[in-house]
Amino acid sequence: MRVYAFDIGASSVKHAIVETNEAPHISSGFPSLRLPALTFQAVRESVFSALAKNFATPAADIAAVAISTKGSVDPTGRVLRAGLFRDYAGVDWAALISDRFPHVPKVLTVNDGRASTWAEYRRHGEHVASFAHFVVGTGVGGGIVLAHRLMPGAHGAAGGLGHIKVQPDSTVRCSCTRTGCVETLASAPAVVRRFHQLRLGAGADVGDGPGRHAGSGRAAAGEGTLGDEIIRGGEITLDDVVRAARDGDEPALRAFRDAGRWLGAAISDVMNVLDPDAITIGGGLLQAASVAAAGGAHESYLAAAERAARDLAVARIADRTVIAPAAYGNDGGLIGAALLASTGP
Ligand SMILES: [Zn+2]
């Protein structure tokens, strides 16, 4: 079955035609649409213009439109809110699209973390019944599959893995408005903040990783290194930290490791609670982290996460859960949403 899939992210809308046979894949990918503004109007214009261009008639032989989106989505497919975008609340994509494109046979909308969870779960096959997927990027999201079912939750909010509390002393405010969430310690902004902290030699604090003690975090200052240059340059981005890590800058490498360890703490909680067959980790930060760790001489974000997870989980399950990087990389949202549109969870 061919499904026209969208993935609405923080700065762009990805779209592609996905073939949902036994080996789901993108059969036609289109260039991502950059959003001129973080508003629902900008998102809607992107989606509509893509549909008008690539799915103009029923002859396009497409069985459904699938939308993977940031924000919380209720079980009927209505987007309740997506804080990042202005006016993106109470949105019913199915109604909007069938109004404008009456020939579109079916529209399914799902949260992006849940969509990629379903893609990764399906990739593992029938022998996996219990499963969790973490998406690490600007925030931390994900989803849970139990007894082969993607869990929606009573209020459409199951799978909020980013809000697992790992550090009660943290004062950094999460996107959920609370503190102590793994999202504040294991996401891309957390890596940048940690790098900054270590580079300025501020010493260890709550960002140090689970099970460590304050006082061990003073960074070797170094002279004339890329890390110094980056710090002097003003505002730091994740790309800067990746470059510094590739250059062997210890604070940069450590910023990734520390963030990975915090992610591992959250993974261990999921292991202890669900005893899943497998847990996968994907998202933009994971890709950046693998570039940062290129060369393999240092423990990577992913390796640090896995080690912390196995160290912290109860002994009975510590070594038995499969922990693996996501198979679909950044395409999980597109493929998972298409799979859900073609078969349902
Ligand atoms: Zn939170």
Image: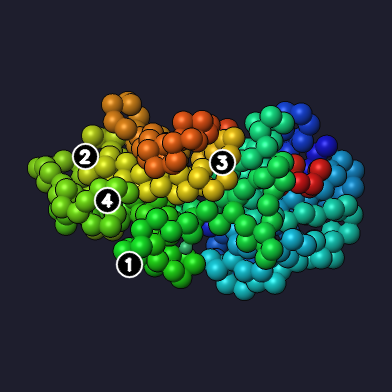
The residue that mark 1 highlights is 171
- Above/below status of 204 relative to 121: below
Q: Are marks 2 and 1 in contact (CB under 8 Å)?
A: no
Among the two numbered marks 2 and 4 on one chain, the one whose residue lies closer to the N terminus: 4
Among the two numbered marks 3 and 1 on one chain, the one whose residue lies closer to the N terminus: 1
In the rendered picture of this protein, how many numbered marks are placed on residues?
4
Q: Secondary structure at mark 1?
A: loop
Three-letter amino acid code at disc 4?
Answer: Asp
How far is the residue under mark 2 from the one under mark 4? 14 Å
Q: Nearer the viewer, mark 2 or mark 1?
A: 1
Q: Are marks 2 and 3 in contact (CB under 8 Å)?
A: no
Three-letter amino acid code at disc 2?
Answer: Glu
How far is the residue under mark 3 from the one under mark 4? 27 Å
Q: Nearer the viewer, mark 2 or mark 4?
A: 4
Three-letter amino acid code at disc 3?
Answer: Asp
Label 3: few (<14), some or many (≥20) within 10 Å?
A: many
Marker disc for residue 250? 2
Q: Are marks 1 and 4 in contact (CB under 8 Å)?
A: no
Label 2: few (<14), some or many (≥20) within 10 Å?
A: many
Among the two numbered marks 3 and 4 on one chain, the one whose residue lies closer to the N terminus: 4
How far is the residue under mark 1 from the one under mark 4? 14 Å
The residue that mark 4 highlights is 208
Q: Nearer the viewer, mark 2 or mark 3?
A: 3
Q: Secondary structure at mark 2?
A: helix
Label 1: few (<14), some or many (≥20) within 10 Å?
A: few
Among the two numbered marks 1 and 4 on one chain, the one whose residue lies closer to the N terminus: 1
Residue drawn at x 78%, y 43% is 3
The residue that mark 3 highlights is 275
Q: Secondary structure at mark 3?
A: loop
